[in-house]
Amino acid sequence: MRFRDEYRDGRAARTLADAIARTVTRPWTLMEVCGGQTHAIVRFGIDRLLPPDVSLVHGPGCPVCVTPVEYVDKAIAIAGRAGVILCSYGDMLRVPGSGGDLLAARSRGADVRAVYSPLDALEVARRNPRREVVFFAVGFETTAPANAMAAYRARQEGLGNLSLLVSHVLVPPAMRAILDAPDNRIQGFLAAGHVCTVMGYEEYLPLAAHYRVPIVVTGFEPLDILEGVYRCVRQLEAGRAEVENPYSRVVRRAGNRTALAVMGEVFRVIPRRWRGIGDIADSGLGLAHAYAAFDAENRFGPVALDREATGECISGRVLKGECKPTDCPAFGTRCTPEHPLGVTMVSAEGACAAYYRYRGIPARSS
Amino acid sequence: MSRDDDFRLTCPLPAGAGDTVQLAHGGGGRAMARLIDALIRPAFADAELDRRHDGALLALDGPAAFTTDSYVVRPLVFPGGDIGTLAVHGTVNDLAMCGARPRYLSVGLILEEGLPLAVLRRVVASMGAAATASGVRLVTGDTKVVERGKADGLFINTAGIGQVVAPVPVGPAGVEPGDAVILSGDIGRHGMAIMAAREGFGFETVIESDCAPLAEAVLALFAAGVTVHCLRDLTRGGLASALVEIAEAAGRAIGIDEAAIPVADHVLAACELLGLDPLQVANEGRFVAFVPGAEAERALGALRCHAPASGAVVIGAVKEAPAGEVTCRGALGVERIIDMLSGEQLPRIC
C-alpha cells in the first residue's frame, strides 16, 4: 500500500538503527509524546532495534487517557437524561468513570452512539430535532478543528439541539509540566506529528530554547520514528537543542491556517485537569464566550462529580514518563483490557494497552 | 430476473396486509400459511418442505456433524451479500470445518413487525441460491413474528447436519509442531464491508464481503489425500482470534509472518484510516488449515482450484511451546504477541 509500505521497510529501518547506534556515545532518554507513536514503537518493536543507551519513555499523548474521570462521569450523567443522544468517538465508550463506562450506560438504556466525526453528531442533531444531541468533544489539538467545526456549523445553522461536552487539552503545556518536574529525566522529545499538522511547530521553539531540549516533529510509521530518534540523539550528542521537522511531508511550520482559524473562533484557552497528572494552567480548550450556548455544561447545569481514580493504578506516572507499564505490579494480572484499573489499559492509544497487546504478560520471578 | 424485480411485491397476501410483515404473519393462521407458501417455500424449493410435515426425515450414512448458529447483522443487505447468504454459508462452513460434507439445514426466521416483504423476499431468495451453490438442502423451518422494536428487522437461525468425510477427526487436538498454517485468502473484507455499509463512509472503492461457501475447497483437501489436522473458519474476531483459540486448545505455539498475510489494498486502507487491525477484522469466506509441513504444497494445490480459496498461502507454522502463544513477525523482523480482540472493535479517536 502506498504511503505506508515505504515507511515500514525493514532494510531502511536497520540502516537507520545502525546510524543511531554509531551516533550514540552515552545514555539518552527520549519521550515520544503521542500514544499513536507508542503503539507503533511497541507493535513494530522499534525500541528493540535501538542501542541500549537510548531509552524511549511514553508520553501523555493519549487523548482518552488524560480525560478526567469527572468528565466521563458528566457524560454518563448527561446520557442518562431523558431525550438525550450522547455521541462520542468509539474508544471513549470503554473509558471507566467512577462508576462504569458509557457502554454500560448504553446497556442500561441510555442512547449512546459512536460516531466517526463530530460532523456526524451534527447530522444526528439535524435528524432528531426534538432530541438534545450532545457530542463528547475530547482530544488534543488534532481533534480540535473538527470539533470546532461542529460547533461553528451548529451556530451558523441555528441548530439549537446540539451541544458539546468539551474536555480538550493542549500538548505544549504538558511538555512544560513534565520538564518542570523536579525528577524529570526527559532529554529530548519526539513531538506528535498529527498535533503539529494542525498547530505547526513554532510554539516549540521557545520550549527547546528555554529547557535546552531537542524537539523533533515525528510521524507514526517505523521509519518516521527512527528518523525522529536519530535526529534527536544527533542533536544531543552535538550539544544542540533545536526544533527539527523531518515529518515535512505532512507538517508545515505554521500549521494548518484554516484549522487554526476555526479553532480560534470557537475555542479559548483555559486551565484543565489531566487525568493521572493533575491541574495544568492554560493547558486546555473550552468554548469561547460566543459559543457558550453550545456548551453542554451550561445547557444541562452542574453534573460534576469530582472524584479521581485511586488505588494501585500507576497510570499517572506512566503518562508522565516516570515508569513503564510493566513496572506496575497489577499489569496483566489484576489489570487487563477486560478488567482495567486505569484508562491507559483501555484506550487504543494507551501505553499499557500497547504492551499488553503486543508483548503479552511478562514472566515474573516472584 | 433483474435486481429491481427482487424488490417488487408480488406476494398474494390478504388485502390490507400491505407490503410489510404483520403480526398476523406469525399467528399460525392463514396469513402465516400464505406467507410461507407464497414467499418462503418457493425460495427454498425442497421436496421435504413440500410434504408440510412437522419435521424432515433424513437419510444419513455413518458419522455426522451437527452445528447451529444464529445470525444478526445490520444492515441486512450489504455489498457482497445479505443476512440470508450469511446464514447459509456460515453454517455450511462450520460443518466443513468439522471435515464434513454439508447435507441439510434448518431455518428459523424471527421477523420484526414492519419488515418490508421485499427485504424478506430478497433474503429467502439469497438463502435458496446459497444453499444450491453449497450443495445443501433447506429441509425444515420455523417462522415467528415479534412486535416492532423487539428485533432488528430480521434474525435467522440455521442448524446444519453434514456427513463426515475426514478419515480422522479434525480439530485443535490434532495440531502438531511442524504443521504449516495455511490461510485460504485475503482477510478483512467482510468486517470492513459491513462497517462501511453501516456507517456510510463512502469510500471511493466499494468493499464487498468475502461471504462464500467453503465446503468444496475443504473437501478438495481430503480428496487430495492431505492429512488435515485442524480447520477453522475466520468469523468475528478474525484471524487473530482463530489462531489464539487453536493455540490455546492445542497447547502449542503458532508463529506467523505478517508479510505473508494477504490483505487487499482497499481493505488495508480502510483499516488504517479507522485504526483497526486487519488480523482482528471479521471474515465470512476464509479459513485456516493446519496440515503437516511436508504436505503444505499439495494442500495449496488442492485449495487453489476452488474460487474462495484461490488465494491460499502458508502464513506460518506450529511450534512446540510456549503453549497457547501466537506470535507474528512484523515488517521490521521483530516478533510481537497476537491476542484476541478485547471487547467490541471500536474505531480510535485520531
Image: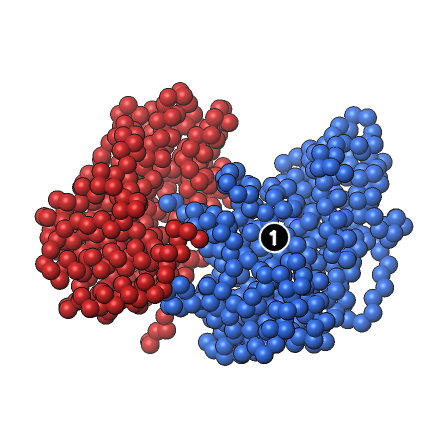
The answer to whether residue A75 is above or below residue A315 is above
Q: Colour of chain B?
A: blue
Residue plotted at (22% across, 49% down): A245
Q: Indicate the amino acid at tag 1.
A: Asp
Q: Position of residue B208 (x, y in %)?
A: 59, 47
In this view of the protein, can residue B242 be seen by the observer?
Answer: yes
Q: Quadrant of residue A287?
A: top left
Give the residue at x 82% y 35%.
B31
Which residue is labeled 1 in the image?
B210
Coloring scheme of the render? by chain
Vertical order, A130 against B154 (above or below): above
Q: Nearer the viewer, residue A102 or A63?
A: A63
Query: Residue B108's spot in the image, x, y percent?
Result: 74, 49
- A202 above or below A151? below
In the picture shown, does residue B81 fall above or below A53? above
Element assignment for label 1: loop
Q: Which chain is red?
A: A
Measured as percent of width and height from the top left, residue A31 is found at 23, 56
Q: Quadrant of the N terminus of chain B?
A: top right
